[in-house]
Image: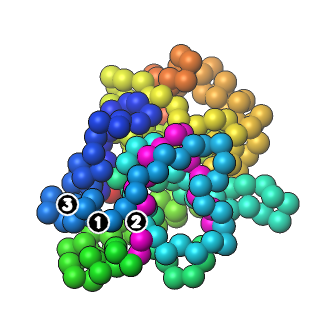
């Protein structure tokens, strides 16, 4: 279910149907989803798209851009706990959700109602299996993030996020650069650091010759060493 992409932030020319097929869903079932009653919403990154504590009787699919799930501690400090790339979904749940949703970059999101989505899944076991695999994949990513923030040092945390992002965006790291979709504060909110620390880590990665930055574009000069520093093994993304 790895989704291969070109290197840009968002590719509006690629349909959600193609994203879902690329993620492993049969064409006829992808058609069922995109023909479901829905609206397309453009989500800006400057404010939350969905606040915590709000009912989530809806399904979302990312068509372009990147969405994040976030939680805040008692003092209001934010932790980004998950990312959703094009082709990924956020499924309905009973009651309210204890996480908020915000775009990392400008994103286009398909939003449908649970009352239209649930009958499709119940009537088509293939859809249920697809979403079960999607849930398992997101769980595996969540476990990896827990290890990343809990056990790795600051350099490894950032390196791991960059490696994972390149893999999820389908970057050919030996040929192309990756447009960094994150601000330094967003990276800090994902890796459990301060933005000042993140800035130091980027400078250190450049001094080590692991990356080169050109504006927002990152080039991986030594992918094997970058993976070693990050302890990055991409099997959990499958």
Is residue 60 highlighted in magenta? no
- Quote the CA–CA distance across marks 2 and 1: 7 Å
Q: On residue 112, which mark appears? A: 2
Is residue 108 highlighted in magenta? yes
Q: Residue at x 38, y 30 (%)?
A: 7
Q: On residue 36, which mark appears? A: 1
Q: Residue at x 63, y 20 (%)?
A: 207
For the residues bearing labels 2 and 1, Cβ distance under 8 angstroms = yes
Looking at the image, residue 28 sits to the left or right of residue 65; the answer is left
Residue 105 percent across, percent down from the top left: 54, 40
- Quote the CA–CA distance across marks 2 and 3: 14 Å
Q: Which residues are magenta?
A: 98-114
Label 3: state its secondary structure. Answer: helix
Q: Which residue is mark 3?
A: 31
Classify 10 Å Cα crowding around label 1: few (below 14), some (14-19), many (20 and above): some
Task: Indicate which disc, 2 or 3, sits on the residue closer to the N terminus.
Answer: 3
The overriding secondary structure of the stretch rendered in magenta is strand
| Residue lying farthest to the top in this orientation | 214
Task: Indicate which disc, 3 or 1, sits on the residue closer to the N terminus.
Answer: 3
What is the quadrant of the C terminus in the image?
A: bottom left
Q: Is residue 32 visible?
A: yes
Residue 36's place in the image compared with 124, above or below, is: above
Classify 10 Å Cα crowding around label 3: few (below 14), some (14-19), many (20 and above): some
Residue 110 percent across, percent down from the top left: 40, 56
| Residue lying farthest to the right in this orientation | 75
């Amino acid at each position: 279910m790895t989704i291969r992409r070109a290197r840009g932030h968002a590719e509006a020319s690629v349909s959600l149907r193609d994203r879902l097929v690329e993620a492993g869903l049969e064409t006829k079932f992808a058609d069922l989803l995109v023909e479901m009653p829905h609206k397309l919403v453009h989500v800006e990154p400057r404010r939350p798209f969905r606040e915590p504590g709000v009912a989530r009787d809806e399904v979302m699919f990312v068509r372009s851009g990147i969405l994040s799930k976030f939680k805040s501690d008692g003092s209001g400090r934010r932790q980004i706990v998950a990312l959703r790339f094009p082709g990924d979904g956020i499924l309905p749940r009973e009651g309210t959700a204890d996480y908020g949703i915000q775009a990392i970059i400008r994103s286009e999101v398909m939003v449908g109602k649970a009352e239209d989505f649930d009958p499709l899944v119940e009537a088509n076991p293939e859809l249920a299996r697809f979403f079960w695999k999607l849930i398992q994949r997101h769980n595996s990513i969540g476990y990896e993030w827990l290890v990343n923030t809990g056990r790795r040092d600051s350099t490894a945390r950032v390196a791991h996020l960059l490696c994972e992002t390149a893999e999820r965006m389908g970057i050919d790291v030996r040929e192309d650069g990756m447009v960094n979709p994150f601000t330094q504060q967003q990276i800090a909110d994902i890796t459990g650091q301060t933005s000042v620390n993140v800035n130091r880590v980027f400078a250190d990665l450049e001094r080590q010759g692991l990356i080169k930055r050109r504006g927002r574009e990152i080039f991986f000069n030594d992918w094997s060493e970058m993976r070693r520093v990050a302890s990055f093994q991409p099997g959990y993304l499958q």
